[in-house]
Image: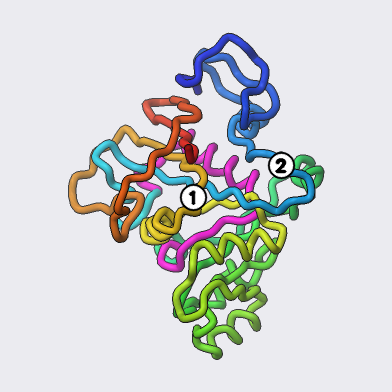
Amino acid sequence: MRRLFPVTDETAARPGESGPVPPPGDREWTLEELAGAYAYPEPAAGRREPWLRANMVSTLDGAAQHDGRSQPISGAADMRIFGTLRGLADVVIVGAETVRQEGYRPAREREAFAAARKAAGQAPATAIAVVSASLRLDFSWPLFTSPRVPTLVLTGAAAPPEQKAAAEKAGARVVIAGDGTAVDPARAVRALADLGMTRQLTEGGPRLLGQMIAAGVLDELCLTVSPMLTAGDGQRIADGPALTVPRRFALASLLEEDGFLFSRYRRT
């Protein structure tokens, strides 16, 4: 792993980072260094302000998946960063279709993050929050029946009551984040923050990320550019209606390993 931006000879932590900062040379980073490079901003004392970051991967020609899944365009370094981002987050927000396609399971408790999570007042493992308007989910999946911390289901007030009951019976926590059947991204982010889950991470899919961008709630995008070409009609990382005016983000850091680029952009 090597740092391409920002380049400096200093080893002090930069704004938005904590812990030792590796020099720009090419070498394997420790988990502590990766966690420091991707640290969440420190919240103001006594405030529960959410910080929502997205973690997505894209090929050189703009595909967010191959054969319906992101794994074929990922790599070892990408998975290390994927695990680091999960280890830092209070909650992972994910769309129901992505849960089905990627075969989501509960986030596991990782010993390497145990001390830091305890010191930060976090649960032993990251919670998963599934966004679903219809609640057409299989609540017998391990994601709902055997998580380390209860899985949350974000839905609208008008979601089918029998499906809400099925979710709760399986052990999930139903969180209402919309007046009708649809989920309001801003209300979802706020509802999770009110539960103490301010360090938020979304892994998509593209439709959910598009909704979050349109709602103006995305604070940070961690984008892996995979050195692969797929052609075809693969989805982009964000889907849905276009913004009236493109929204600009600022480059915060850029890392590279084995041809993969790991960029981090923040809201200006």
| Label located before the other in sequence (2 or 1) | 2
The correct choice, above or below, for 96 with respect to 254 in the image is: below
> With 25 as the anchor, is 236 left or right in this view?
left
Q: Which residue carries the number 2 mark? A: 113
- 61 vs 192, left or right, is left
Residue at point 35%, 36% (across, down) = 226
Q: Which residues are magenta?
A: 71-98
Instruction: Give the labeled residue for mark 1.
Output: 218
What is the secondary structure assignment of the residue under circle 1?
loop
Q: Residues within 10 Å of mark 2 (few under 14, many from 20)?
A: some
Query: Circle 2 sits in a helix, a strand or a loop, which is it?
Result: helix
Q: Residue at x 37, y 26 (%)?
A: 259
Q: Nearer the viewer, mark 2 or mark 1?
A: 1
Whether residue 133 can be seen here: yes
Magenta segment includes 84: yes
Given the image, on which type of amino acid does mark 1 rest? Leu
